[in-house]
Image: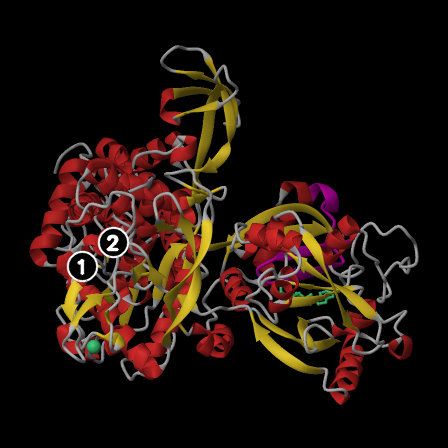
Amino acid sequence: MAESYNPQAIEAEAQSYWDEQRTFAVREEPGREKFYCLSMFPYPSGRLHMGHVRNYTIGDVIARYQRMLGKNVLQPMGWDAFGLPAENAAMASGVAPAQWTFDNIAYMKKQLRLLGFAVDWEREVATCQPEYYRWNQWLFLRMLEKGIAYLKTGVVNWDPMDQTVLANEQVIDGRGWRTGALVEKREIPMYYLAITQYAEELLAALDQLPDWPEQVKLMQKNWIGKSHGVRIGFPHMVGEGGTLWVFTTRADTLMGATYVAVAAEHPLALHAAQTNPHLAAFIEECRHGGVTEAELATQEKKGMPTGLTVTHPLTGELLPLWVANYVLMGYGEGAVMAVPAHDERDFEFAHKFELPIKPVIRTRAGDETLAPWQDAYADYGVCINSGQYDGLGFEQAVDAIAADLSAKDLGEKKVIWRLRDWGVSRQRYWGTPIPIIHCQDCGAVPVPDADLPVVLPGDLIPDGSGNPLNKYAEFLDCACPRCGKPARRETDTMDTFVDSSWYFFRYCTPGATTMTDARADYWMPVDQYVGGIEHAILHLLYSRFWTKVMRDLGLTPVAEPFAKLLTQGMVVAPTFYRETSDGRKQWINPADVKVQTDDKGRPLAATLSADGQPVAIGGIEKMAKSKNNGVDPQSLIEQYGADTARLFMMFAAPPDQALEWSDAGVAGAYRFLRRLWFHAAEHQEAIRVAGDPDAAALSGPLRELRREVHEALRQALYDFGRHQFNTVVSGGMKILNALSRIESDGDPCAAAVRREGLSILLRLLSPVVPHVTHALWRELGYGDDVLDAAWPAPDETALARDLMTLVVQVNGKLRGQIEVPVSADREFIEQAARAEPNVWRFVEGKPPRKIVIVPGKLVNLVC
Ligand code: ANZ
Ligand code: ZN
């Protein structure tokens, strides 16, 4: 074999071996345990980044580990191929979105292949292919039939200059990204998927996902947002009179309500605006504000009185009615009873507009009567200033108040949800066409199944003025499926979250002529899903929902798509910058910087390599273009090879924690692989001819050394099971260190221990560094393919210790320690303890009065 480690040659050889053997192509094998290992598929942006490399390496290590355990492992890969960047690229460079996307896929696929992932590429899916998205359309039609998909008006961002709808990310500070024009809200008809019909199950089933991170489950839970509260009516005399309903989770604070506020779109606000131009202008202003909840929570509190009043349902007091920008039309009743003493937002608002603040809950400090109030007290406590409800705790007060309101027909307990139905219509080109045809006579008519897929033309070039499908007659013009008259095709496409909601089913059934088939019943659910925490809410929730819809349509027996979830940590790196003359930070790539460090490796100062002048050291941050602190995986692989990249990634941090980039760490990983190669090359001949170690015949250092190997193996196997790959790698390093201490190759016992030790090491590390272990497995004559080898198991006889260490005490004080054979009897231990020089000094040679022996632990001599 080659004397020196040549990763490029080794990796190319291993990869072509796997390709020729079709090593990772799998089929269903009923009766054999399967393992479906899935990493979140990438958006084909053009190049892999380090986050991808980390994600897919973690997934690959798990997949290969499970395969070594003997399971039938499916690890597929594909492309989340629809989305806005392809349209932007088309606009910027004139390359059609389909072309751009497939070019990127080809390039990134080459990069992925260089990393040696154990992927069954015969199952590759790109979501922009008609054979994939036709099933988005097909399931959408089934949802229409079941009333899960429906049409409703929704609010969109409208750029008045470009005459186009903008995606949320195209609105920057309230203005269109291209035109800079003030963005307006427009109401247009859109399709929604009734995910709220599944809210209860989506929430309850989280409890049946023990192998999901708690944090992710909590985020889903908050997003679904089940609120128990009371719907309370405030009678009013507006128009012909009526009742204004609010929703509150704090009915116990009803006696502290000092005003009532409605959303700008609320009918009472619109009514008041008819005779109040100021209010009308304010409502108009609110229409330009943010739409997301985060925007509403953080924006400055604005409001205006309507001049109207409503009646407190219990006291009969008249309360002023305000319009406030922090009240959402789409939540609860679109109206709140405001209790400034106990709600942050109401407090801020009341403070600003000098509305009364009335405390009705005892604070823990008992200081509620002290004015002026600094802040709302939002915790629970007993009622005060609340008449007959004084002294009641939260639940008692809510029950009593709800009962009294109910007697007047002005209240009832109610559960509401934060979760909204999923609006899937996008006024964008590069997505799945919504399979609807608009006919003047028949209205919105579903495309018949036989006419699916509605194929998206791939070569239109958007010019910025909206969806190019709107001007493309070949797509637009069609016949009404119902009456045959000329009709117009729907040009909205589906939210790209649809594409990622079921791709894991499609991987199971390549070539299927139905949405899914029995093969998916074998593979689903995904046993291990690996991906970024940024998808903890929407992608996972939509996938869970889509799967449940498929289940209800009889397409799968599976209710939850992902049995286990691992959310990997970020890849972070130091940042460096210089300030430009106008005070902006110019970020400098770490590769162009020389850093001086202290003896603990902490950075002291940095200079730009090009000019030797200092640069400022910024914080450690997520690798990103904006901070110019990324390292390109391609150059890493070219310099060191894929195994080094993989080894560094696995060794530097546990998968779920942040991984800090370190050039020294990468170089260290490379050195280890070189040492491993060198060790194997040096002892190749001896290993090839050596036999198996005879456990009984081993003694002394060789026996001890073999014990170390098996102990490291035992620990590493445990760490593999809990996905603690960094300590798996350090276990491998321990084994190599132990084997390096074997001196002689001439001694057959020594050669046997080395042979066994290296075979353990290669199998153990094969999931992490598959190429070098593949090559060495063959070179050392262990077999053809390390992937077919049995997963190593520690040998119990090797683990047994010859000697044990006992602590020796004199009168309970630690005075020394002794090593005795595990089989030593009491007398032997006593003699050894007394012979220990330090112990001898303390007992002064006198026989002790009593000797206590705790087996395996200590000896205490009582004098
Ligand atoms: C009175 C009150 C007193 C409230 C108090 C809180 C604290 P969750 O838990 O998220 O369901 N609210 C209700 N509808 C709203 C809307 N359309 N827009 C903005 N806020 C609204 O929150 C329920 C609480 O959010 C309700 O309870 C209401 O304020 C507010 F000391 O009512 B509360
Ligand atoms: Zn028609």
Asked whether 601 falls inside the magenta stretch, the response is no
Closer to the camera, 799 or 671? Answer: 671
- On screen, 177 above or below 493? above
Residue behind label 1 places its C-beta within 8 angstroms of ligand 2: no
**SS for dot 1:** loop
The spot of residue 357 in percent (x, y) is 84, 58
- Label 2: few (<14), some or many (≥20) within 10 Å? many
Of residues 345 and 659, the one nearer the viewer is 345
Q: Position of residue 444 (x, y in %)?
A: 28, 74
- Labels 1 & 2 near each other (Cβ < 8 A): yes
Residue 319: image tag: none
Residue matched to label 1? 456
- Give the residue drawn at x 70%, y 47%: 814
Ligand 1, by image quadrant, is bottom right
The residue shown at (44%, 16%) is 607
Left or right of 104, for residue 234 = right
Can residue 801 be seen?
no
Query: What residue is shown with label 2?
Result: 430
Secondary structure under tag 2 reads loop
Q: Which residues are magenta?
A: 840-863
Where residue 276 sits: x, y (%)?
66, 57
- Determine the residue positioned at 42% across, 74% down: 194
Residue type for callout 2: Trp
Q: At which x and y percent is residue 758?
A: 26, 48
Q: Is residue 827 visible?
A: yes
Q: In the image as oriented, which residue stretches furthest toward the bottom?
A: 407
Earlier in the chain: of badge 1 and badge 2, it is: 2
> How are the colours assigned in the image?
secondary structure
Image-based side of 561 in relation to 469, left or right: right
Q: Is residue 443 left or right of residue 388?
A: left
State the quadrant of the N terminus: top left
Three-letter amino acid code of the residue under disc 1: Leu
